[in-house]
Amino acid sequence: MLVTLILDFDGVVVESLPLKTAAFKKIFSFAPGHLDEIIAFHLENGGMSRYDKFRHIYKNILNEPLTAEQEERLAGEYAGLIFDAMLTVPYVEGAEDLLRDCSRRLPLYIVSATPEGEMHEIARRRDLTKYFVQIYGSPKTKAECIREILAETGASPEEALFVGDAPNDWQAAYETGVRFVARIPPGDPNRFIGRPGVEGIIENLHELLEYLRESICSSRSRTP
């Protein structure tokens, strides 16, 4: 039985991936010869913090050292490009219905790679905090956050479901033993082929609510 629902934010609650991809293209526009590889890495690692992405890109793609000052400059430029837009970017189809219905029935959590302070502010300004028991972000890893949630709720891994859109999300679920459902937007490639433990694939959160219909967060299961 499901007793805890954990959601990634980008690409699961809001359709923010095109915005963040455009921001990555802009901040790395100084390296046009590497841009395709940089963006491919960014897309493949949607569940990774921006700081870890910067470090990987400099070390393994640009083959250059990354100073602390450069890292903070990149982070500041990136945040400046996305923050205001994150307050108005559209919800994933069905997200508002799912949050409203499921938050009445079981504890909901956000586990995001966005810096935690920034994630809290985005949720507050979008009036989303009312739906969640807690909102987690980096620098903690997603696996660390999930373990904290399990300890807090007393739920077994089999009683918790994590919904994510990136292989990094799957990895966090696999490491912690929680159930996993992948969200793949229409037209996007399936990056979860061959990964064990993916128990469902959805395009939107209407489909997730349907998937959960037998659980306590289904609006149809309410007592009249």
Image (cartoon, rainbow, N blue to C red):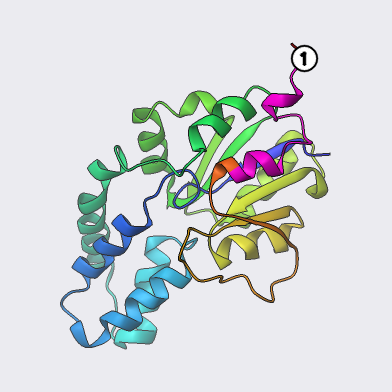
Counting every numbered tag in the picture gives 1
Lateral position of residue 70 relative to residue 45, left or right: left
Q: Foreground: 167 or 206?
A: 206
Q: Amino acid at mark 1?
A: Thr
The residue positioned 71% from the left and 40% from the top of the image is 212
Left or right for 88, reference 17: left
Q: Reply above or below: 20 against 27.
A: above
Residue 160 at x, y percent in the picture: 74, 44
What residue is disc 1 on?
223
Indicate whether residue 171 is drawn in magenta: no
State the image coordinates of residue 148 (x, y, percent, origin top left).
67, 44
* Residue 60 falls left or right of residue 215: left
In the picture provided, is 176 more to the left or to the right than 13? Answer: right
Is the C terminus in the top left, top right, bottom left or bottom right quadrant?
Answer: top right
Task: Tell me the quarter of the picture where residue 196 sits.
Answer: bottom right
Q: Which residues are magenta?
A: 207-222
Q: Residues within 10 Å of mark 1 (few under 14, many from 20)?
A: few
Label 1: element kind: loop
Q: Residue at x 84, y 39 (%)?
A: 1
Q: Is residue 215 magenta?
A: yes
The answer to whether residue 86 is above or below residue 77 is above
- Residue located 51% across and 38% down the image: 94
Q: Residue furthest top?
A: 224
The vertical placement of 19 against 42, above or below, is: above
Point out residue 2 in the picture as x, y percentages from the top left corner: 78, 39
